[in-house]
Image (spheres, rainbow, N blue to C red):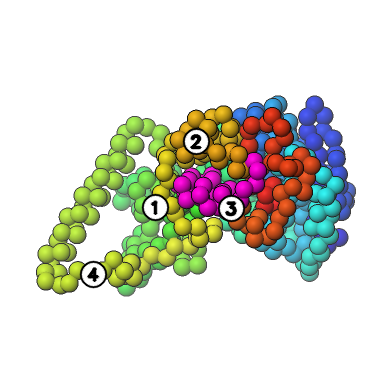
Amino acid sequence: MNTLQLYISKSGSTNARLAEINPSEEGRSAATDMKPAVALIDYPASAKIVFFIVVNVSDGYAVHVVRTIPPTRPNHLDATVFVNKRLDIMAEDLAEVLDKVSKIVLAAAVTEADMAELRNLFAREYDLRDKAPRIKPSRGRDFARLSYGEESGRTLSDILDSGLYQPEWSDYKGVILLDDSISAFPNSLVDLDYADEEEYDDEPQDDDKPEESVGKEGETHTYVFALPVSLPEGRSNLEFELESSKTITHSPVAGYEVAGRLTEGQNHSNKLRRSKGKTLYEKLERWIWGVGGVIAGIILMAIVGLFRGGESKPTQQNDVAETSVKITQNTENKTKVKTPQSSAATAYLDANRIWRQEEMEKIDGLAGLFDDLNNYRFDEITGKWADSLGGSENFAKVVKAAKKSVAKHNDPLRGEEHNPRYNREGDTAIGWVGYTFWIDP
């Protein structure tokens, strides 16, 4: 079989199989109930969130696309994508499939039209490998976790590019992949970022220093680091390259740590993420070093200014051109950043996944927005509201979806439950994530 397989199940008091596409015996055996794993995730019972669980079997690996079912934890809908080890599938192709499956399972119900779309998607045929790789099945007793998003410094695409089959993941019962902006993992889960890392001191003693820490004369070590940055339009990575006569063993940015093992070379980007200081002393030390760095920078600029003397002051454009920093964006950051008119308005939009009309009408800068969203007034959403609420990360995603909906000529009235308005009569709450998936499926 040279196609992907899909198994849709509902897990409540029992586990019921709802649909299958391209089924096989090995695929069915991999599409098991993930209720024990879902129960480990810390999420509000009223929330409808999507995350992934990867489980390896001898014939391939299963990616469970899990959508929680409010209001009872850990009830959920599970759309399991099974990838046979013979399939030679590209990361971008798998990303497209997982994205489409996620959007469909996040909807209020999986309709016949949705199933037709899924059958068409899973009818695609892929090349087969000449020699199938050996897969180490998941054998562990515990589940492990791997986050992606702003805090972790990685995206889901980064994980897919590395390959969802990782032999070391088979030491666990499964690996849970979750956007760190949606929910949080309890400490009881094994953190893959730290599972294999060795502890080290900031100031190792001479006996503890690795022999290669001092390079040979003329030898240089090159490292590329990726620092996560967050903009209203989305997330990006700020990449910079360092050359040193000694090996680098720590993050060069105060307050950040390397996610995983630090690797030398221009072809590998070392992801950075915020350090997780646990004590007041650590936080105070980080603050002191940060302030000290700013003061040192001011002093250095003053000294450089004295040496330049009568040189003409470079323009801002020249300053930018001389900076040897490359920004690699992971999202489409094409929307012009606007200054929000109301911080209370943007704070509400970013702090809540469910936007309620009665609450929005009381906040300066949000009155009327709910009505425009509910009535699909995309001109207002991408115009007036985009200008005044440009500082909101959540609303920027709604604006992006609205623009794509207009460009694609999507019909938001295609479903009875969202016609003629998004909400039915009397419903005064809109979940912004589900709204974006509906207008831009």
Label drawn at residue 348: 2
Residue beneath label 1, please? 251
Label drawn at residue 314: 4
Please name the amino acid that badge 3 sits on: Asp
Q: Which mark sits nearer the N-terminus, 1 or 2?
A: 1
Tell me the SS state at disc 2.
helix
Q: Residue at x 82, y 44 (%)?
A: 111
Q: Residue at x 42, y 39 (%)?
A: 343
Q: x, y percentage for residue 422?
A: 69, 41
Q: Residues within 10 Å of mark 4 (few under 14, many from 20)?
A: few
Tell me the SS state at disc 4.
loop
Label 3 vs label 1: CA separation?
Answer: 45 Å
Q: Is residue 71 magenta?
A: no
Residue beneath label 3, please? 379
Tell me the SS state at disc 1.
loop
Q: Residues within 10 Å of mark 1 (few under 14, many from 20)?
A: some
Residue segment shown in magenta = 374-400
Instruction: Please name which of the two marks, 4 or 3, marks the residue nearer to the observer.
Output: 3
